[in-house]
Amino acid sequence: MPGGVIRRREPRGMHDRARGAMLGLAVGDALGAAVEWLHPDQITSRYGGPLRDMAASAMWELGEWTDDTAMAVELASSLADQGGYDEDDVFGRYAVWARSRPKDIGATVAAALRRSRSAAEARATAEAYHLAEGRSAGNGSLMRTVPIAIRYRADPGAIERFSRLDSSLTHHDPLAGDACAWLNLTVAALIQGRALPRSISDVALAAEAAVAADEAELATAAQEQRGYVMTTLRIAFAAAFRHDAFEPAVVYAVNLGGDADTNGAVAGALAGARFGAEAIPQRWLEPLLRKEVVSGLANRLTRS
Ligand SMILES: [Mg+2]
């Protein structure tokens, strides 16, 4: 076929589910931003019930997303521009962003990125931070990792490798990398319309158990283990697989309070990959800032 373009046959609905993962991340992040660090009782007294609509807050404009989506946009831009995962390029973009005085940045991420001049230096700094603090299994790499699932949706080996590599730039604890890999393997299977991955790893079993976990136990974890990577992963799996639509999944995640923007972002990415961008409520997409950038990046990643 002279002059013709050879196209890989893609599963039906794949582009919508890939856009759903990116837009779901941004929407969950922006919705949760208004109630970050609150207790569910405080959310109820402020909004007269669960938060169901985008709201401005003292720190965030209506529809404004936070560091979670900001870092995911850097990662997605790098993957699209470079055609794949290039850790020097990714590190460079994260570092420029971290030094741009963002409105919010996690302590683990800031420690690794603010003064490092290379990916290797960031990793060494992340290790030193881990040793000094005694832990580094925060959710700051999980919150940004989903573009890797979109780019490598047909290559589970690459997903595992690059998810862990990207996480290790800022989070020394391998548990953070395991959580990124498991989220991305699941997101990729959903985007491709494949059967969900199965594993007997601790992270996979914890994510699976969260879907049937006691509501009160997850609600307690959301308050008492805020920012812990497994708390966010478990809430995201409970949100995306206990509900039969995008909206109730994300409403559930953000209304647990605590690290509500990150829990909302990861739940939104997973639910968006499951239900697709078409399932995201228009009233949430309308005020979302820079939504063309977010959805355009998903489109670019599905073309490579
Ligand atoms: Mg945030």
Image (spheres, rainbow, N blue to C red):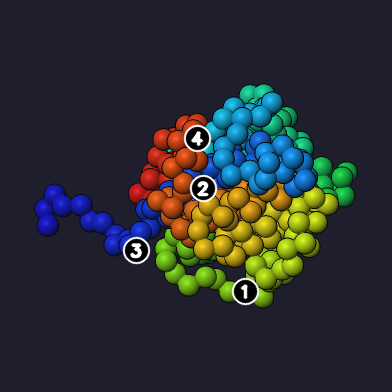
Q: Residue 167, percent across and down?
A: 65, 49
Task: In the rendered structure, find residue 24 and report the number of the disc placed on it.
Answer: 2
Q: Residue furthest front?
A: 48
**Regarding mark 2 in the picture, which secondary structure is present there?**
helix
Amino acid beneath label 4: Leu
Q: Pick whichever of labels 1 and 2 is earlier in the sequence.
A: 2
Location of the N terminus (image quadrant): bottom left
Distance from disc 1 to disc 2, alpha carbons, whole Å, reads 25 Å
Residue at screen point 41% across, 35% down: 292
Up/down of 163 relative to 100, above or below: below
Distance from disc 2 to disc 3, alpha carbons, whole Å, reads 20 Å
Distance from disc 3 to disc 1, alpha carbons, whole Å, reads 24 Å
Q: Which residue is mark 3?
A: 11
State if disc 2 and disc 4 touch (CB < 8 Å).
Answer: no
Q: Pick whichever of labels 3 and 1 is earlier in the sequence.
A: 3
Q: Which residue is mark 4?
A: 288
Q: Pick whichever of labels 1 and 4 is earlier in the sequence.
A: 1
Q: Nearer the viewer, residue 201 or 272?
A: 272
Mark whose residue sits in front, 1 or 4? 4
Please identify the quarter of the rendering in which residue 87 is found. top right
Q: Which residue is mark 1?
A: 199
Amino acid beneath label 3: Pro
Mark whose residue sits in front, 2 or 3? 2
Residue at screen point 42% across, 63% down: 192
